[in-house]
Image: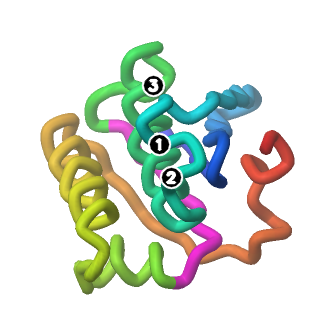
Amino acid sequence: MEHVFYSDGNAKRISWVIQTNDSQVEQIREHADIYLDKIDTEQSKHIALHVGLFWGIGTFTIKNNDTIKVMVDSKSMYENLVNNSGSSDRFIATRTDFIKKFIVQRKLNVNYNLIDCKENLATKLL
């Protein structure tokens, strides 16, 4: 099955949208206390992708071997995920490692797409 995945985050919340065929699921969460007002936007965007993918698998919205078009509105995040360029931010590097391991474990076919922030459906949920 194919999905289009949008995610976003800020210092207080994360959100994600998963589109599948004719359905769309929208989710928003407050950051856990250990992150609330302690992380920057870029770090929060990585948390949103990480948590959103886990949520998608946990609710059976996304299944093993599915194809996911991940829509990313941050050029640095896109470069990090696509080119394995790494990040000097240890927090982001750890989240990226978790995301990549999860994708391999679940045999997901993931394609990253850089979009304008105005096109990010998850942003309106914040």
Instruction: Name the mark nearer the viewer: 3 or 1.
Output: 1
User: CA–CA distance between discs 3 and 1?
Assistant: 18 Å
| Residue bearing mark 2 | 38
Crowding around mark 3 (Cα neighbors within 10 Å: few <14, some 14 to 19, many 20+) is some
Q: Nearer the viewer, residue 15 or 82?
A: 15
- Label 2 sits on a secondary structure element that is loop
The magenta stretch spans which residues?
66-75
Instruction: Name the mark nearer the viewer: 3 or 2.
Output: 2
Q: Amino acid at mark 3?
A: Trp
Q: Residue at x 26, y 82 (%)?
A: 88
Check residue 73 for magenta coloring: yes
| Residue bearing mark 1 | 35
Q: Residue at x 66, y 43 (%)?
A: 12
| Residue bearing mark 3 | 55
Residue 6 vertical placement versus 90 (above, below): above
Q: Say left or right for 79 vs 19.
A: left
Tags 3 and 2 touching, CB below 8 Å: no
Q: Earlier in the sequence, mark 3 or mark 2?
A: 2
